[in-house]
Image (spheres, helix red, strand yellow):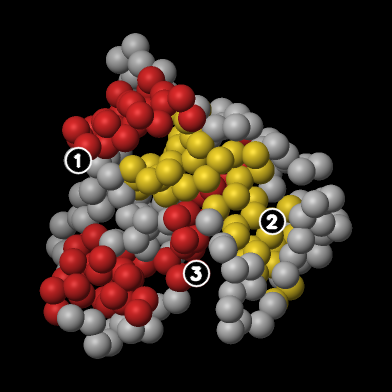
Amino acid sequence: GGDMTRTPGPLAISVTAFGALAGARSPARAEAAVGQDLWVSGAIGDSALGLRVRLGQAPGLAPEDAAFLVERYRRPLPRLGLAPLLAAHAGASMDVSDGLIADARKIAEASGVAVVVDPALVPLSAQARRALAMGAAALPALLTGGDDYEVLFSADPAARPILERAAQETGAPLTLMVAVRGAPNSPGALRVSNTLSTVTFFCSGLYSTVWPGVKLRLLAVGRAAPEGWTVR
């Protein structure tokens, strides 16, 4: 589902590939545990910016930056070298296809834990940072844009040295974002925070977003915030 393409024709070929694990474990999104770290590979938001470039919605970018971002949108880089590492050390794992925020929430929901993501720790490419600085997009668009196809996974803190060393050896950058926390009253809760304020709160149908300079829009009403949680 969701495969949309365009071609002048006359021939279009669609390929579906099936495979089997060669004796290795495949981490599921439901296997995150309280106290684990949350990691993501590569950089987030390049694809969303590349799409904006293609749609003419990011004027003023340097040609080389625009070309880089479009390439990231059109040809995502599969992190195949991380597969053995994930099989050995990941708790939960999934690809970032619907956006970092949406997919972190899926892990939280499936695992019955709370996940806190700090935007300041989300890895961005130099090209994305320059695009943000010149106003070509806002950070929320990068965190929710999707089509990154990076790997989001949890792992025990004891595995940090192994993961950092493997990232250097495989050339696949890994970023430690935050710890997986205990579920506050209900499974599937996700709070996105930064060093200045709480910017997003998820819990049982309640989704409210506040970014500096953006008015609060309440999209759905759910139960009251769990004890110890605030929505600013």
Is residue 111 shown above or below 177?
above
> Where is residue 195 drawn, in percent x and y?
57, 63
**At label 2, which amino acid type do we have?**
Phe
Q: Which label number is shown at residue 210?
A: none
What is the spatial separation of the Cα atoms under label 1 and label 3, in whole angstroms?
27 Å
Q: Nearer the viewer, mark 1 or mark 3?
A: 1
Q: Are marks 1 and 3 in contact (CB under 8 Å)?
A: no
> Where is residue 82 drawn, in percent x and y?
29, 32
Query: Camera-side residue: 63 or 28?
Result: 63
Q: Residue at x 34, y 61 (%)?
A: 124
**At label 3, which amino acid type do we have?**
Pro
**Left/right of residue 182 with respect to residue 125 in the rendered view:** right
**Residue 201 picture quarter:** bottom right
- Residue that numbered label 3 is attached to: 140
- Residue that numbered label 2 is attached to: 202
**Left/right of residue 166 with respect to residue 111 in the rendered view:** left
* Any part of residue 27 in sight: no
Is residue 54 shown above or below 35?
below
